[in-house]
Amino acid sequence: MHAQPTGQTSAIEQILADVHRRTLGRRDGELADYIPELGKVAPDPYGIAIATLGGKLHCIGDVDVPFTIQSISKALTFCMALELLGREDVFARVGVEPSGDAFNAIEFDPVSRRPYNPMVNAGAITVAGMLRDALGGNAFEILLERFSLAAGRALELDEAVYRSEAASGHRNRAIGHLLLSVGALREPVDPVLDLYFRQCAIQVTARDLALIGATIANMGENPVSGTQVFDVDAVRDTLAVMFTCGMYDYSGNWAYDVGVPAKSGVGGGIIGVVNRQLGIGTFSPRLDAKGNSVRGVCGFRMLSDELGLHAFDPTNRGSALVDSFLAR
Ligand code: GLN
């Protein structure tokens, strides 16, 4: 079953249209070209989708254009690792501290020698190692199935992007071998990197991201299908790390301005989760210097303001404060 756009033009759709119109003119930023195939995508599509916990979908623009999930996958694989191994074991191998450095930095926490967090490449490759150890040779299929359940449709691998990254991902290979040298990965490293490159090359749309976000917002249950996709405790931990580390070395600014747990990817997508309330997906491929979608960041900022989504905004209807206030 798919979430359908609602028929009437609601206030939320007017706000979406307004935000889209006001940010559409942004043509600055660059396509990610360090994965050669990503440098060839059309730069102009722009879509925003919002999915509610009631299973309603509100969309504007290019919400059905496929792109690769890239780093957004890191939030979902972290959630899966927490479920499979438990938070203690995961925490023993990857930290939860923002690094303040670029997502592909070749560095570890100098004291613990662990990757700083699961949202940077070093942490995500470590998580891929955990999934590969726990799930074996079928790890990718299992992961793809889980991502599909969250999106509410069968997702697919973008073979061209996968091959392109697998052929050119020398920096990630270097990180993989360093992780081996500090004991965060076990031999062999190649299948782990292969899993990581594949998870990054899963094709999604802005609509999918909204549904995946709504599934996370709904304590792990897909609000359209009713399937429990993620464990609620793992969702809690995942949201905390998305909030502090999800937007690379822009995470502090994002928490300040937008105030929504989120994760971006160099394919141009951003997923946002307004806990117990909404999932939001944006797609626009041109990236700023930190690797975040230019229009996506602007659009999220405006949406957060217009809809009062900031976690610490007292008008946010998802906040415990207002809920308890309304319940009285
Ligand atoms: N596959 C990309 C990489 O590892 C993902 C990075 C990203 O989206 N920030 O470089």
Image (cartoon, rainbow, N blue to C red):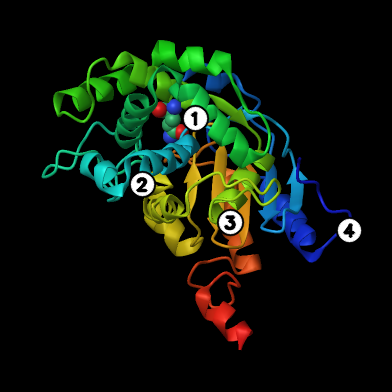
Question: What residue sits right under mark 3 in the picture?
Answer: 218
In front: mark 1 or mark 4?
Answer: 1
Report how far apart the C-alphas of labels 2 and 4 lie in the structure.
39 Å
Pointer 3 or 1: first along the chain: 1
**Marks 1,4: beta carbons within 8 A:** no
Task: Kindly identify the amino acid type of the residue bearing the numbered disc 2.
Answer: Asp
Report how far apart the C-alphas of labels 3 and 1 lie in the structure.
20 Å
Report how far apart the C-alphas of labels 4 and 3 lie in the structure.
24 Å
Answer left or right for 304 relative to 65: left
Question: What residue sits right under mark 2 in the picture?
Answer: 249
Split into quadrants, the picture shows ligand 1 in the one at top left
| Quadrant occupied by the N terminus | top right
Task: Kindly identify the amino acid type of the residue bearing the numbered disc 4.
Answer: Gln
Question: What residue sits right under mark 4 in the picture?
Answer: 8
Q: The residue tagged with tag 1: helix, strand or loop?
A: helix
Q: Residues within 10 Å of mark 2 (few under 14, many from 20)?
A: many
Residue 34 seen in render: no
| Residue 168, percent from left and from top | 40, 14
Q: Quadrant of residue 207?
A: top right
Answer left or right for 127 relative to 72: left
Report how far apart the C-alphas of labels 1 and 4 lie in the structure.
36 Å
| Residue 34, percent from left and from top | 44, 22
| Quadrant occupied by the C terminus | bottom right
In front: mark 2 or mark 4?
Answer: 4
Task: Kindly identify the amino acid type of the residue bearing the numbered disc 1.
Answer: Leu
State the residue in front, 199 or 121: 199
State the residue in front, 99 or 150: 150
Question: What residue sits right under mark 1 in the picture?
Answer: 143
**Marks 3,1: beta carbons within 8 A:** no
| Residue 126, percent from left and from top | 30, 32
